[in-house]
């Protein structure tokens, strides 16, 4: 019997040693992936929660998951079966068990500092729109998310989902600009600065000064070798047709009645826009799902301006659609004021929902801590 108890003590000691040992590389890898998934879910829930708040005109509150730590617990047990009898020492049963638990912990704090506020309120830069347009994404979706209104010849087209008639009036105007006038972004040609320079007249100070001022030194002639200081081109928005020149001015001039003016959104404006779309589909009076044309037919066709699905010969897909009260599998889901809101993890019937949510998430991360140009008004003027 003493030998059996000695064995059990030794086994407990061994289990304790195992549990107190360092985590294996596999454990660390699994923990890291688990933390990453938990953090991604938390950030997505924070974004969706603020979209829901915006739909109810409640104050937005973003949080920062700045600290990630781990809580670990371990336990070891041995169940001993000790039957009575003369041969009890020979049939003593030892049933060891051990368990380890790892739980991620996040430090949460409100994001209300000046840099964050400035970042999410600044108009989204044309450079970002240009980069996104180069990818295989819907141009109408990008323009719808970026542009809050269009002004032309004294008429204003509001990208306002709260008013169905005004929303589709904007969409029809936007589609005309994108499809018929090829509204897009373009890098302008570089601008020469000063006269050409002979190779022998260039020294280290010239090169250093050029770099300090953001200029490039480009060879423009081979024999004799000549160089030219150039200021790099800028990204602008252009369209085909009369007067395609665009001025995205830091202090824009007063627009004339025959100008075309686009006004860009901020990240905060994009979150509020998605909130307005959510409100349009969940309100009690005349609810509807804001849609845009879908050449790739993402899921089933939704109603367009004419009201019927595909009634104008095209398929219209939701910009952003949230299931309220549904318990179906979701990309992200939150409960707010007793109601559950879920973003479907599928394009089937959801149209551009996942794409729009992912873009908002990406831009929130990108610009929430960047110092935007303070005098960028977000106005783009097309001078005719």
Image (cartoon, rainbow, N blue to C red):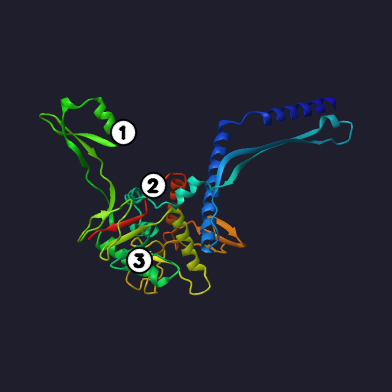
Q: How many angstroms separate mark 2 from mark 1 (CA)?
A: 19 Å
Closer to the N terminus: mark 1 or mark 3? Answer: 3
Asked if residue 77 is positioned above or below residue 280 in the image, the reply reads above
Q: Is residue 327 visible?
A: no
User: Picture coordinates of residue 31 (x, y %)?
Assistant: 57, 38
Question: Residue 6's image quarter?
Answer: top right
Q: Nearer the viewer, mark 2 or mark 3?
A: 2
Indicate whether 39 appears above or below 82: below
Q: Is residue 350 above or below residue 221?
A: below
Q: Position of residue 111 (x, y in %)?
A: 54, 47
Pointer 2 or 3: first along the chain: 3
Using residue 169 as the reference point, say whether residue 115 is left or right of it.
right
Task: Tell me which label, 2 or 1, sits earlier in the chain.
Answer: 1
Mark 1 — residue?
212
Image position of 366 (left or right of 203): right
Q: Is residue 276 left or right of residue 67?
A: left
Q: Residue at x 37, y 64 (%)?
A: 292
State whether residue 284 appears in this view. Answer: yes
The C terminus, quarter of image:
bottom left
Q: Position of residue 287 (x, y in %)?
A: 48, 72
Which of the two residues, 103 or 134, is positioned nearer the viewer here?
Answer: 134
Whole-angstrom CA distance, mark 2 to mark 3, is: 29 Å
Local SS, label 1 = helix
* Residue 171, numbered label: 3
Which residue is the site of mark 2? 373
Q: Which mark is residue 125?
A: none
């Amino acid at each position: 019997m003493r030998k059996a108890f000695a064995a059990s003590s030794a086994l407990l000691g061994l289990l304790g040693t195992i549990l107190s040992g360092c985590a294996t590389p596999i454990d660390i890898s699994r923990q890291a992936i688990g933390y990453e998934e938990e953090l991604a879910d938390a950030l997505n829930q924070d974004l969706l929660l603020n979209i829901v708040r915006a739909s109810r005109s409640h104050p937005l509150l973003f949080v920062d998951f700045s600290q990630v730590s781990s809580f670990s617990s371990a336990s070891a047990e041995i169940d001993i079966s000790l039957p009575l009898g003369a041969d009890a020492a020979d049939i003593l049963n030892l049933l060891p068990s051990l368990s380890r638990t790892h739980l991620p912990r996040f430090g949460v704090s409100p994001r209300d500092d000046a840099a964050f506020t400035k970042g999410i309120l600044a108009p989204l830069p044309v450079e970002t729109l240009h980069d996104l347009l180069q990818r295989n994404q819907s141009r109408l979706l990008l323009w719808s998310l970026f542009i809050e209104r269009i002004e032309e010849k004294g008429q204003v087209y509001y990208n306002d989902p709260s008013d169905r008639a005004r929303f589709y009036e904007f969409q029809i105007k936007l589609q005309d600009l994108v499809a018929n006038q090829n509204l897009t972004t373009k890098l302008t040609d570089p601008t020469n600065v000063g006269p050409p320079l002979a190779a022998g007249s260039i020294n280290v100070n010239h090169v250093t000064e050029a770099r300090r001022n953001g200029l490039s030194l480009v060879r423009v002639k081979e024999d004799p070798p000549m160089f030219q200081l150039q200021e790099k081109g800028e990204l602008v928005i252009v369209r085909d047709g009369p007067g395609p020149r665009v001025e995205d001015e830091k202090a824009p001039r007063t627009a004339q009645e025959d100008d075309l003016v686009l006004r860009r959104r901020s990240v905060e404006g994009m979150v509020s826009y998605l909130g307005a779309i959510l409100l349009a589909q969940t309100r009690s009076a005349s609810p509807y799902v804001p849609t845009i044309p879908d050449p790739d037919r993402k899921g089933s066709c939704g109603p367009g301006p004419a009201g019927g699905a595909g009634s104008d010969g095209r398929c219209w897909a939701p910009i952003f659609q949230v299931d309220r009260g549904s318990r179906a599998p979701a990309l992200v889901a939150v409960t707010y004021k007793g109601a559950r809101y879920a973003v479907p993890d599928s394009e089937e019937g959801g149209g551009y929902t996942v794409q729009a949510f992912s873009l908002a998430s990406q831009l929130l991360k990108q610009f929430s801590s960047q110092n935007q140009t303070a005098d960028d008004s977000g106005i783009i003027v097309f001078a005719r």
